[in-house]
Image: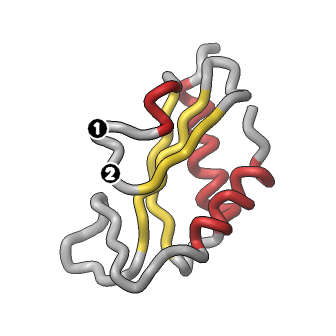
Amino acid sequence: MIEQTELTRVLACLQRSIADDYRATIQEPDDTLPMVDITIACDEDGDGFAYQTGDNSFAGDCYGFPVWAVSTLSREDNPAHVAAELLAQLREGLPA
């Protein structure tokens, strides 16, 4: 399975790139907190993974993987907490 520390590092790096005008598509329309949509996907073993930000409706690195997790990431979020949430979603989608 993807290590939480590795995913936390990825999210912390992404977090530093969130600009003032970034808005996630899954947040409330009147929310002005800068944030991005984040999608993590992995293979059936949970080892290989990819991530993408923004709208995942049409294309992106995650399309090569069958198990997905989706959340948002703001500059105020704790990257370790978001990583734990995403990993929990992935675990739910992995075969038993």
Amino acid type at circle 1 is Phe
Say whether residue 15 is left or right of residue 63: right
Say whether residue 90 is left or right of residue 5: left
Say whether residue 33 is left or right of residue 16: left
Single out the residue that lies furthest toward the left. 29
Q: CA distance from mark 2 to mark 1?
A: 8 Å
Residue 75 to residue 47: above or below:
below
Residue 41's image quarter?
A: top right
Q: Residue at x 30, y 83 (%)?
A: 32
Q: Residue at x 73, y 38 (%)?
A: 2
The N terminus is located in which quarter? top right
Helix or strand or loop: what does disc 1 sit on? Answer: loop
Which label was assigned to residue 58? Answer: 1
Residue 37: % across, % down? 41, 58
Asked whether the beta carbons under mark 2 and mark 1 sit within 8 Å of each other, the answer is yes
Helix or strand or loop: what does disc 2 sit on? Answer: loop
Q: Residue at x 63, y 42 (%)?
A: 87
Local crowd size for mark 2, using a 10 Å CA cut-off: few (<14), some (14–19), many (≥20)? some
Residue 11: % across, % down? 63, 61
Residue 22: % across, % down? 36, 75
Residue 56's image quarter?
A: top left
Which label was assigned to residue 55? Answer: 2
Single out the residue that lies furthest toward the top. 96
Say whether residue 3 is left or right of residue 89: right
